[in-house]
Image (cartoon, rainbow, N blue to C red):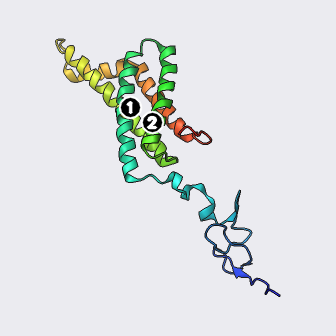
Amino acid sequence: MSTPPTARFCARHPKVPTYLTCATCGTPICPDCFVQTPVGMKCRACGTLQNTALFNLTPAGCVLGASVGLALGALGGVGAHLLSGIFLFGFFLAMAYGRFAGTVVLRAAGRKLGLAAEILTGASILVGGLVAHAVIALGMSHALSSSHLPVQLNYTALLLHDPFTLLFIVIIAAAAVSRIRYAWGTWDL
C-alpha cells in the first residue's frame, strides 16, 4: 500500500499547508496563490506569459529590429510627405504601410511580442519618419533661403506647415505597434 502524500507549506504563505504544486517549477502553492492555466495550476511567476521566451528580446534582435524600423520609418516619412496632399487615400495607405512595417520589424526582432517589442517598433518607426520629414523640410528650407527670413525660421515653418505628413507618420507608427500588439493567433509571423 502507498503512503499518503504529506502536506507541504505554500511558498508565499509559509503557515498554509497545501498539497498543490506548480505544474512548471514544482513550487508548493496554496489555493490563494495559484493561477489556472490550460495545462494546470501554476505559481504566479510561471502562470504569467511575460516569463516565456516569446517576450524576451535578445540584444541582437533589438539592434536588428531598431535598424529595420528606422529604415522603414524613413521610407514611410518620405511616402507620407508625398501623399500628404491626398488625405483620405493617404490615411488608408499609411495604415496599410504601418501594418506591413510592423510585420517586418517583428520578423527582424525575432518574432518577439510584448511591451518592449511594441516600444522598439513604435519608437524606431516614429524617429525614422520624423528624421526623414526633417531632412525634407531642411532641404526645402535651403531651397527657400533666398528669402529674407533666417534659415531656422524657414525650417520650423516648413516642418510644421504640413500637419498631414506628421499625422501620417504617427498613423504609420501606431499601425505598426498595433500589428505587434494584436499578433496573437496569426500564424503568418
Residue at label 2? Answer: 104
Instruction: Look at label 1 and name its amino acid.
Output: Leu
The residue under the point 34% across, 33% down is: 71
For label 2, the SS is helix
Identity of the residue furthest to the right in this view: 1
Query: What residue is drawn where x is 39% and y is 21%?
Result: 79
Q: Is residue 79 placed above or below 186 in the rendered structure?
A: above
Question: In front: mark 1 or mark 2?
Answer: 2
Image quarter of residue 40: bottom right
Query: What's the distance in space between the residues labelled 1 and 2, CA to CA?
Result: 9 Å
Sequence order check: which comes first, mark 1 or mark 2?
1
- Label 1 Cα crowd, 10 Å radius (few <14 / some 14-19 / many 20+): many
Label 2 sits on what residue type?
A: Val
Q: Which residue is mark 1?
A: 72
Q: Pinpoint residue 96: horizontal percent, then vertical percent.
A: 51, 25
| Image quarter of residue 47 | bottom right
Is there CB contact under 8 Å for labels 1 and 2?
yes
Quadrant location of the N terminus? bottom right
Residue 183 vs 88, above or below: the answer is below
